[in-house]
Each structure stands twice: as structure tokens, then as C-alpha cells.
Amino acid sequence: MTDTTATLAAGLREGYSLPRQFYTSDAIFADDMREIVSRKWIMAGHASQIPNVGDYVLFHVGQEQIILIRDTAGEVGAFYNLCRHRGSTLCSAQSGNARKLVCPYHAWTYGLDGALISARLMPDDFNKADNGLIACHSRVYHGLIFINLSEDAPDDFDATFGEFDAILDYHGFANAKVAHIGHYPTAANWKLVVENFLECYHCQPAHPEFCSMHPADALLAVGAGPSSGPNEAMASYGPVLAAWEEKAAAMGRPLGNVDDGPETTHLRLLMQRTMREGYISETEDGQPASTLMGKRQDWDFGRMHLAFSPMSHIVADNDFAMMFRFTPRTAMTTDVDILWLVDGQAENYDVEKMVWGWDRTTLQDKTITEDNQTGILSHRYTPGRYSQQERGLETFQKWYLRHLGLAHAG
């Protein structure tokens, strides 16, 4: 933790947003990268993006570039995108296919497994085995590709996320395929992007399309997760949710909530709830954009929100799902990406219909979050009081501060 971060700790107030520097400071961003981002399992992509041997795609986080590549054994590997000679970038294209990875600077050549194959005119004592590509911790889980930048052993993946097996299997993520990718680079600190996604206080004024697809009482009670709204709202919506859960369980849908607190490593979340009455899917007319996904046999009129961490979320309807990636790049820039997934056997799916709601919603989020960042740059900004519909932000803030070794002054 830097002296800048420690000095600001004295001004923290529980129930209020963070001081200005937490959203603007390069020094605090460096703390965030070292203490949080680099130590978490981050959802980087889906295995269907690289189906063939030699297929690769780049994932950017902070100043790092990670090559996600399919090797000759059909496995997905992850390597830092730099040559071991003098650090040149290996892959300049965002995606492609390669029989070998050849550095364009001095032609050092690597296999798809990262091993150094050829390095011209090196001294006799040079050992190729010691100069393979630097591997990044990685894991493919139900088709989802995760990376972890930690230099030490990362948090045990299965112990952290194993309880999601049943729901991910039911939704068919392992056999899904990417139907569309949307990129929404956002000129705002990553915490502002996350905070926006973890509250639905802004939904009614900012997101007419999103609100049109969901019951108003559900958005108030659990619009951004199990504990995001007032307790009174959940008490009102609870019976509706319980009735739907009974029907969904009878149809074979795994249920259960996960609502991690600030003391946890990844702040996971799992919430399943109803769609608006008469709506089957999150589309403009409520009608499906694709065929049923995974193991479903019929439409159950529900949707699922799962978070592996504040930076990695999934929202799944009956016929398609979305992978949300909120990736920190600099103190005031964040990559926001959505990968829309459909069942691997789906053929006649309607991409325009599928992306309608969340594309508009995310463009709106980009605008309001960038406006939020611009306002915070003012020296007259002071932390504001959270509403009863922003309880998720208080949990996130406590989790974030605990990872930095900080706490509220009171």
C-alpha cells in the first residue's frame, strides 16, 4: 500500500462513496493492480473463440497482454505476450491462427506450448529450455477461460468456484458458442464501472430498455443481486420469487443463492429471479432470440446473474447468455466487453434481437459512468451518501478496502 492510499484512509466514511483519489490516482491504481486485480481469477474469454489448433486471442489487463492459445493437444494455454529475448511483443493482431509463435524482431520461435524452438546465433551456454514463454495461471471451467496474474500460487480455483458446477452445467456453458462480441471501452476507473453494475438505483432514470424487460418490484428488491435493495422490497417480492423457484425446480433448474460478504476472496454472487410477466427472454418483445440453452426442456421465464468476482459476471436467460468483463487498464480507463453466447447446436439465432437490450443498456452505462468520472475530477467533489438501493456498493467497498489493508474510520 502506498503512502497516498494510507493517508486517504483517515477520510473514509462508511455508507459514503470513496474519496476522489480512489477514482483518479495512478498510485492507488497501482495498489489496486498489485493487491486485487493481479491476485483474482479473471474471466478472459470462452473456449469457443479458439476452436482450432493454433487459434489465439489476446486478453488485455492493466499493462499486460495475455495470449490465449489452443495447443497441439487441444488444450488452452495462456502466456504473456512478450519474447524472452528482449521483450518484444510476439502477437500484434488481436486474434489469429499460428503454427508457431515467431517474434517479428529477431525471429525467436516458440511452439504452441510456449517452449522455445529456435533462437539464432546464441552462445554455447544458452539453454533453450530456460527461455520458453512465461506462462500465466489459467483454467478452463465449463468453457469459460480464466486467468490469474499472481506470481505466487493463486487461490484454489475449485475451492473458490466449485459450487457453481451444477448451474453452469445446466445452462450449458461448456458447449456454448460465442454469437457476438460487443466492446464498450469506458473512460472511467474500474471501480466506477463495477459500482454502476452493482446497483439498480440508476436503472429507472437511465435504462428504459432494461426496465421494460423486468418486473419493477424485482429491480427494486434484487436488481443488482441478492442484497442490493431495501429489505422491505425483498419482503414484498419474496413470495413471487418463491413461487417461481418452486416451478423452476420442478423443471430441473438448480437453484440457490450466493451472496458473499466483504471477508471473502472473490465477492461471488448468484441470483436467479423472474422475468417480466409474459416475457420469455431479455429481448424487445420478450420472445426468444435463439433455441433453448443447455439442459432445458422448456421455458421457465427466469434469468440468472452470477459473479465470479466484481470484474467477471454472467447473465443467462433461457436462450442466450452474456459474459460481462470489466477489465482495469489505467487509473481512468476500463475495458468493458460483452460476449453473447448461444447453445453450441443453435443455428437460426437472431443476433440483432439478442443484443438489443444489453447493448443499449451498456452504451447508456458507458455514458453515465464516464460522466461520473468527469464529475469526480472536480476538486469540489466530496463522497456522497448511499441510498437503500445501493447496499451492494457498501459490501463491495468494504471488500475492496479490506484487500488494500484499509478500513472505514467510522
Image (spheres, rainbow, N blue to C red):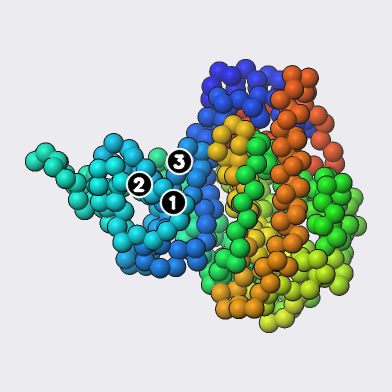
- The answer to whether residue 218 of the structure is visible from this angle is no
Task: Say whether residue 106 is left or right of residue 346.
Answer: left
* Location of residue 238 with respect to 32 vertically, above or below: below
Q: Amino acid at mark 2?
A: Leu
Question: What amino acid does circle 3 point to?
Answer: Glu
Quarter where residue 299 is shown: bottom right
Q: Residues within 10 Å of mark 1 (few under 14, many from 20)?
A: few
Residue marked by disc 3: 64
**Disc marking residue 93:** 1
Is the residue 144 above or below the residue 371 in the image? below
Near mark 2 (Cα within 10 A), the count class, few <14, some 14-19 or many ≥20, is many
Q: For mark 2, what is the residue?
A: 90
| Position in image of residue 207 (x %, y %) | 82, 51
Residue 53 or 96: which is nearer the viewer?
Answer: 96
Label 2 to label 3: alpha-carbon separation: 13 Å
Left or right of 285 in this view: 325 = left
Viewer-nearest residue: 188 or 120? 120
**SS at mark 1 in the image:** loop
> x%, y% of residue 336?
62, 47
Task: Please provide percent x and percent y for residue 128.
Answer: 19, 47
Provide the secondary structure element on which disc 2 rests.
loop
Identified by mark 1, the residue type is: Ala
Residue lying furthest left: 124
